[in-house]
Image (cartoon, rainbow, N blue to C red):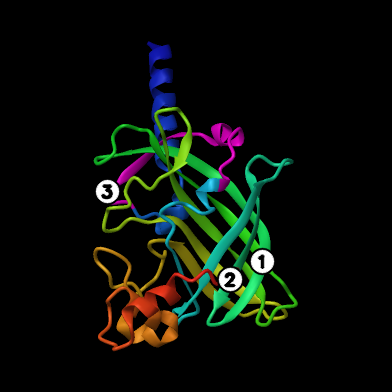
Amino acid sequence: MRLILILIFFSIVSFTCYSQGLSDYEDIIYLDAEYKTTEPNLEELKIMNLSSFWLNNPTERRLGFIGKNYLRLHIKFLSIIKNPSDPLEYLVYGKSMVNDNICEFQGTIRIKESYYFISEDYPSGNKGILAGEYKFFENQASSHAGIFTGRFTTNWYKDESGQLAYNDLWSVSAMYNNNQFAGTWTEYGSDKHLIANWGDSRIPLSGDLDVGTSEFRPADKYASNGWIIFLIANGGTPDKMDIEGARKTENRQWWK
């Protein structure tokens, strides 16, 4: 009887620990239904190369802002290499752009937690969320350069072959999002921090910037903060500018 009680106790404790997983990231996790984390799988991640989770995903539509007025921020990862000395750390090279100011950056993505989860919509238990921290240093020789730091979450699933893949299975969902990065940007030589958030398809903690229902749409009152071309290209403004021209500008490869 005592053994049974002990087993029940540890079972409850174990479930409680799992259900509390990712508590430090709940504010940047957006799923269509309530979820419960089940088993952690950091050990599983150590033997895999997850670079493709953040680099050139087929459904990548990265959107971001910086500052309290939601000035548009562009972020592009160009190279991500798994650190051979640390299986949970990735070395990152990329570029940022605000207005026409482009800066190279390099730094790290570090995975701190990862769990499988279940929900009413997804009871199979083959989906999960990983989370961690990032720090990117822009080239100090560039104009208006600084440091990005913060937290992130990435949704994944286990495919039929048993491999973990970037979760774009929900890309048709109105609230689809992935790779939610939330933090600050601090200019070199300054102690003033600006909010700097970005993500795939949606932006975390975006306040009243995002007024879209079926997909991301910036509020008209912020259009002049770098979002006008985006609005025209996506049919969200009556501006007479050529829509095709706007789409061409919106889709240009500014990082090259």
Residue range (magenta): 31-51
What's the residue at 62%, 63% (across, down)?
A: 94
Neighbor class of circle 1 (other Cα within 10 Å; few <14, some 14-19, many 20+) is many
Residue 3 visible within the image? yes
User: Which amino acid, by three-letter code, is at mark 3?
Assistant: Ala
| The residue positioned farthest toward the top in the image shown | 1
Quarter of the image where one finds residue 248: bottom left
Residue 212 is left or right of residue 198, and the answer is left
* Residue 93 falls inside the magenta stretch: no
| Residue under label 2 | 96
| Residue under label 1 | 105
Q: Earlier in the sequence, mark 1 or mark 3?
A: 3
**Mark sitting on residue 33:** 3
Residue 225 is left or right of residue 243, and the answer is right
Position of residue 113 measured from the top left corner of the image (x, y, whole percent): 53, 44
- Residues at marks 2 and 1 touching, judged by CB atoms closer than 8 Å: yes
Q: How far apart are the alpha carbons under marks 2 and 3?
A: 33 Å
User: Which amino acid, by three-letter code, is at mark 2?
Assistant: Ser
